[in-house]
Image (cartoon, rainbow, N blue to C red):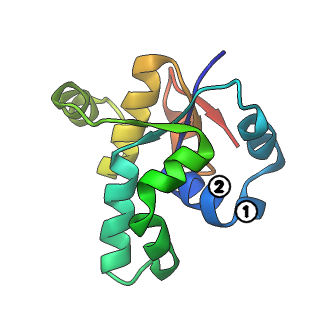
Amino acid sequence: MTPLLLDTHAYAWVATQPQRLSAPAREALADRRRPLLVSAASPWELAIKYRAGKWPEVGVLLQEHDEVLAGLGATERPVTGSDAIRAGSLPWDHSDPFDRMLAVQAMAIGAVLVTRDRAFRALPGLSVLW
């Protein structure tokens, strides 16, 4: 079964505000047979936004990251040097480094990226669910 990789906001919402997810995303995430992945880039992005005061409600998620992953039945996908090279080299006119990382990680393993961010739809070879 095709794995799902959560965009950062989808990770935060599935853990804290699942009602914010789209109905198709909630349905796909409810299927526990489907591998669920969270990139190590996501807690990194959350920590930056939390520290800057842009996303104060994710503090608990950051403090309990490992427990949240376990509760979701998710596996953390590490960020590797190869991922970084692919993300930096990706021919995509989008400058957000976290988005670039999530895109290459999803494409590398044939995962569907769960995201509401429309910018990903312009990227050939990436499957998106929202």
Where is residue 120? Give x, y as percent: 52, 40
Q: Secondary structure at mark 1?
A: helix
Q: What x and y, as percent, mark residue 57?
A: 52, 78
Which quadrant holds residue 84?
top left
Location of residue 28 with respect to 115 vertically, above or below: above
Instruction: Identify which residue is drawn at 45% across, 63% down.
Output: 64
Relative placement, left or right, of 74 versus 63 is right
Q: Amino acid at mark 2?
A: Val
Q: CA distance from mark 1 to mark 2?
A: 8 Å
Decide if residue 71 is in sight here.
yes
Q: Is residue 95 visible?
A: no
Q: Is residue 9 shown left or right of residue 18? A: left
Circle 1/circle 2 CB separation < 8 Å: no
- The three-letter code of the residue at mark 1 reads Arg
Q: Decide: is 64 above or below 92.
A: below
Q: Residue at x 27, y 34 (%)?
A: 87
Q: Say which mark, if any, is on residue 29.
A: none
Q: Quadrant of residue 48?
A: bottom left
Neighbourhood count class around disc 2 (C-alpha, 10 Å): few under 14, some 14–19, many 20 upward = some
Q: Position of residue 20 (x, y in %)?
A: 73, 62
The residue where tag 1 is placed is: 20
Q: Is residue 113 above or below residue 41?
A: above
Q: Where the C terminus falls, by quadrant?
A: top right
Is disc 2 placed on a helix, strand or loop? helix
Determine the residue positioned at 36% across, 72% down: 49
Q: What is the quadrant of the N terminus in the image?
A: top right
Numbered badge on residue 14: 2
Residue at screen point 22% across, 36% down: 88
Task: From the viewer's side, name the closer residue of 55 and 36.
Answer: 36
Lower position in the chain sequence, tag 1 or tag 2: 2
